[in-house]
Each structure stands twice: as C-alpha cells, then as structure tokens.
Amino acid sequence: MSDIAIKAESLSKEYFIGQTNVAYSTLRDTIVSAVSSPFKKAKALMKGHAYGAANLQESIWALKTISFEVNKGEVVGIIGQNGAGKTTLLKILSRITEPTEGKVRIYGRVGALLEVGTGFHSELTGRENIYLNGAILGMRKFEIDQKFDEIVAFAEIEKFMDTPVKFYSSGMYVRLAFAVAAHLEPEILLVDEVLAVGDVAFQKKCLGKMEDVAKEGRTVLFVSHRMGAIRNLCSRAIMLNQGHIELSGSVEKVVHEYLTFAYKKDSAFTSQVEEYEGSRDKDVRIVGFQARAIDAKGGHPRTGVGAEFLIDYAGRARKRVGRLYVGIAVKDILDSGVFFCSTNMKRSDFYDAPPRGRVICKIDSLPLVPGRYRVDIKLIDHETGGGYMAASASFDVGDSVDSGVNRYASHKFGNIIAPHEWMLKELEEAET
Amino acid sequence: MIILEPSRGWVGLKLQDIWEYRELLYFLVWRDVKVRYKQTVLGAAWAILQPFLTMVVFTIFFGKMAKIGSDGLPYPIFSYAGLLPWTFFAQGLTQSSNSLVSSANLIRKVYFPRLIIPLSSVLAGVVDFLLAFTVLLGMMAWYQLTPSAPIVLFPLLLVLALITSVGVGLWFSALNVQFRDIRYALPFFVQIWLFLTPVIYPTSRVVSLLEEVGLPGWLVGLNPMAGVVEGFRWSLLGTATNPASILLTSTIVATSLFVSGVFYFKRLEKTFADVV
C-alpha cells in the first residue's frame, strides 16, 4: 500500500451555473418573489450552500465518478479538451475546492502550480516577491533562503532583484514567477498548463526542469495541451472527456487516441475540403478530395496496399487551365510532415487542363503506419502566375492483412514503413 | 496522509492548519504593511495624519463649538484616545471585509487556510496603530498625564479591539463573497457604528442616559467598541470612571462575535473558491 501516492474513489464535482428562468405569470408573483427571495437566499446561505446571491439552480458535473490511482514516483499526464475537467481535478487534489462526492487519499505533501506568479505584488521588488510567492506556494522560509540564489540564477534577473516587479518586462516577470514555482519540492507535484511561458529558450529550460523533477522520483500530475511535452515527461496518461475518464494507460496509446479522437470530433474532416487560403481571383478551386485503396476491396487506404488520392477541381469561368500544378503534403496528427508529392517533382504539370477535372495521384504501395493523417493540397495555375488555392482534408489509413508487414511500428518511431527486406549472412573469419 | 472528501454542516476548526501556515500569515501581513503606503509622498505619515486630523476636526466642532463634555480631560487627547482604537478597528474591519474578494485570484489558485486572509489584513493595521500610538504618548507628555496602575490592562484592550475587528470582519468577508452588497453597505455601517461608539462623546453621558430610563449602565458595553474606547481612556488617561462591568460585557460580546465568526467562516470556506 505504501507505494500509492494518490487514490481517488468515484470523485465528482458539481458546479452551479446559469440561472433557471422562472416565468412570472402575474405582477403579484413577481413582487412576492422579489420580497421572499432575499430570505430564501439568506436561509440557503446559513446552510452553507455555494450559490449565494446569484440564483444558480442549473448545475453541471465537471467531474463524474472518477476513480484512479497514482503510484509514488509516477509521472502522469492528464489530457482532454477544454472543459473536460482537468483543472477541476487538480483543484480538488490541491484542496482548493472540495469534491461534491467521493474521496481522495493523498499520501505525501502536495504542491500545486495552477498558475505561475500567483500572489505576486507589483509594488514589491523581485526579492520580496520571491519570498511572498514562495510562502504562498507552501515553501518554508528556510527553504526559500536555501534556494534563493538558485531561483535568481534560474530566472536570469540578478540585476533587477531590488526593482519593483511592476517595472519588469513581461518576460522577466514570467521568468521570475516560473523560477520560484520550479523550485517547489513537494512529494506530489500538480502542474497545470504553465510551461507555455517566456521565449523558446526559456520554455526549453522549463521543460528541462520538469524532466529533472520527474527523474528525481517525485510523483507528478501534469496537465497540458502540448502532446509533445506530455510524451516527453509522462509514462502514463489519463484522458478526460466531459468529466469522465475516457482512457487511461501508456502515454503513447492515450495521446494517440486523444489526437485521433480530437480530429474525429471535427466534422470538417470527413474527407470534405475546407478552403483556408486562396487568392482573390481563384482561377482554380479544389472541390473535392478522396483517398482510397485501389485493390479489389476498395474503401479506406490501407497499409502496404496501392492507394490513390483524388483531387477534384473546377476552373473559373469554364476556362481551360494553362499549366496546372498540384502538390499534396501528408502530415501526421501532430502536424509534422510525413511525405510530399507534387506534379512539379515528377515534371508532370498538366498543360492545357480542362476547366473541370480530377487529378489522380497514385501510390503503388502506401507506406503509412495505420492511423489518421491530414493532407494539405495546393493547386496553382502556373501560367497565369500565382492564383493558387490550398485546402486541407484528412483520411484514415487502415490495417491490412496482406501488407506483408506483421506488426506495425508505433507512431513513436515514425509514420513511414520503408519498403525493406531482412537477411542474414554469415561472415567468414577474417584472414590475417 | 490527507483524505479529501465532502464536508457537511459545521466543520471542525482545524486550528493546527493555521499554525502550519503561520509563515504565510507572517508574509501576508508583511506584504500589506510594505505595500500600504507605497507610491505615496507622505508614506507611513498617513497612519498618523488620519487620526490626528480627525482629532483636530472633532476638537473644533465637537469640543469647541458643541462643547461636548470630555470627562474632565482636554478634548483633543480625549478624542484622540478614542480615535486611536476606533481607526484601528474601522480600518481592520474594512480591509478584512473586502479581503477575500480582493484576494480572489489567490483563493482560486492556491490552497491555504482561508482564515489567514482576513486575519492578516487586520493584523497589518497593528503597525499603523503603533505609529499613531506614539502621537498619543506625545500628547500625554504635553498635557502632563501620567497613566496609573490600569495601564497593565492596555495590551488586553488592544486584543479586545482586535478580536472585535476580526470577528465582525470574518462575518462580513464570508458574506461578501456571496453578497457583494456588503461592499456598498460597509462604509455606511462603519459610520453609524462610529456614532454609536463613545468616540466623540464621553461614555459617562450614555451611562447616565441609560440610568435615567432605569436601565443598567453596563448595557453600553453591548457595543464592544464602547468597552474598548472607554477602556483606553481609563487605562491610559486615568478617567475617574470604573468601566469593569462595561468591559466585561464588551469582552463577552466580542468573544461571541469572534467565535461565531470563525465557525461561520469555516462553514462557508469550502465554497469560496467556487463562488468568489
């Protein structure tokens, strides 16, 4: 039992929101309600109800019967879309707010970073704010004394320690705030999306600091929308969706599922083309996109099976297109490029193309690991110069039994399966 | 191990929690003191000027023009000795009543016993009080008033003013989270309370008024600040009155305000982060 750090049992949190509209039928009702409601409110208040002066009767469950365990030394990422309940969960674990139902057992001292620079006072100097902020985050004075130099060095603002922080640039302010927070050393650390501060170099430093914390064997719960950071730091992840635990497991699996899930929710992605860029006088427009397998089964493109991308376009004013260029960039769901094909690459721009047409890009054997991909498409009439049109769409790559590959590599190691063979040759003993 | 679960009804006070966070209390008081007169020309002199100038105005209007009695003391020192605890009380009450709302950001983002917030805003006033107190000592030397034996009770009177201020401040700050009406009602409320407290006029006048209609004089102590003000004059300036019964009444009232305030505050504490 001693290796458990956090154990949550059917945790729920209800928030009162909005206001129910009571229809007043008569003037008398309105007056009666106006007179009696302060008393009702006062009565509710004496009972310790949360909604106070606002007439909040509608409620939402920000968290609903969440149960999970976190072991000591584990670094767990919490992901989910906005409103999934991530911050509510951290607020309950850090004792800021009480759960409505359920129970959490926490074994160890908890430190929470829901925001950097909480309690900073603009009139106080950097030095004074370090002590104040440290105390607010739960550090003891002797701890702050010990780490003071380290904090100042980390923030890189030695020269301005005795300047009121209201004269700091926003970058300096944030660096100082993060520096204090980063030196908090509780047994269990709860971190909300706070790493996105400062310039790129400082962000790297912050991530590095978080990695150190994770390596020191402390228990960390880390909320972030940045999947890269989650994948780097965490070993396990929990995906929340509308107050429920949607999935919990290895970070690779959960992150991948989350991204796929996030794109699926986006209805624009059912291979429908969404215009997002284009010149004012679009000479050609993309009107359709499709990705499909070209074996007997048809349907979704599948790994190791021939596939084709179909791009339908329509020219303006039924004019033939002088020189049609088409390029497609396939990206993974983290938005990094996987491969790129273009007519230019193959020296096969289409000259004197019909006003309406379907461009087909054929790939003999699709080398993609199963999963969801995005595609950015670009169409340009090179003759009229400029006048291009871009669109993006997405497609799924399915599993295939006849792909000749037994187990697909994880997305962690890449999205491409290069056509390859394995063989073994015995080497002769080297002759001297 | 900490167990977090919903609490129901009246909850325990968990005073050891506050002890645990005593350093934060210290830092918040220190912050309030440091920040209070930042970016002012006169700085901490304001702590002295406020009661002092009020005393001057009172002396002109109430002492000279209205000729309100002052228990045989010179009116300036009579009113100043009343204004001193009153200013401490009124400032503490105002600051603490608004403290939770103005610390909303802290409450939403960090855990600590919320009781520390109103407590620190009252305690920060002690520094102002001590500064203004030096003026009273100066005035005592000027009027050649030497305190007698009751002066040993003086620190207890400060504690009484503190308890009253915190007690009412706890009620108001917790209510203010839910009902922002408090913010608007407060200045008016404090003003009325000033007139109900024998700052401008002597307690002996109220006592004799009460006795005329056949009521016991200690009733004046139901206003705990009446006990504090009267106690100040008695212990420091040696007024001839013997306010023991008034002081006792005030102590009982102040203590019950404080204790009920703490319990009410603790009961609502869990809702602060969601409502503020």
Image (spheres, grey):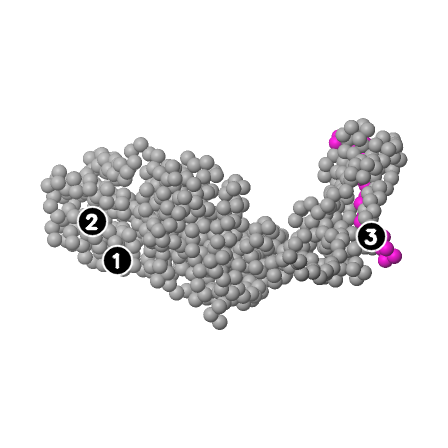
**Whether residue A355 is visible:** no
The residue identified by callout 1 is: B251
Give the farthest residue toward the bottom.
A1
Indicate yes or no whether the magenta region holds residue A293. yes
The numbered disc on residue A306 is: 3
Which of the pair A374/A44 is nearer the observer? Answer: A374
User: Quick check: A228 above or below A14?
Assistant: above
The magenta region covers A279-298
Tell whether label 2 touches label 1 (CB within 8 Å): no
Q: Say which of marks 2 and 3 sits in front.
A: 3
Q: How many marks?
A: 3
Residue positioned 66% across, 58% down in the render: A430
Hey, what amino acid is under mark 3?
Gly
- Residue on which disc 2 sits: B232
Asked if labels 1 and 2 share a chain, the reply is yes
Q: Secondary structure at mark 1?
A: helix
Left or right of residue A418, residue B201 in this image = left
Instruction: Tell which circle, 1 or 2, labels the residue nearer the N-terminal end.
Output: 2
Amino acid of disc 2: Phe
Could you tell me if the residues under marks 2 and 3 are in contact, i.e. CB atoms within 8 Å? no
State the separation of the CA atoms marked 2 and 3: 96 Å
Camera-nearest label, 1 or 3: 3
Callout 3: helix, strand or loop? loop
Can you give x and y, in whole percent of width and height, for residue A14 in the image?
Answer: 55, 59
Residue B225: x and y in percent read 27, 51
- Between A278 and A352, the one lying in front of the other is A352
* Chain letter of the residue carrying label 3: A
Residue A370 shows in the view = yes
Please identify the quadrant where the C terminus of chain A is shown: bottom right
- Residue flagged by tag 1: what amino acid is it? Thr
Dot 1 crowding, Cα within 10 Å, few <14, some 14–19, many 20+: many
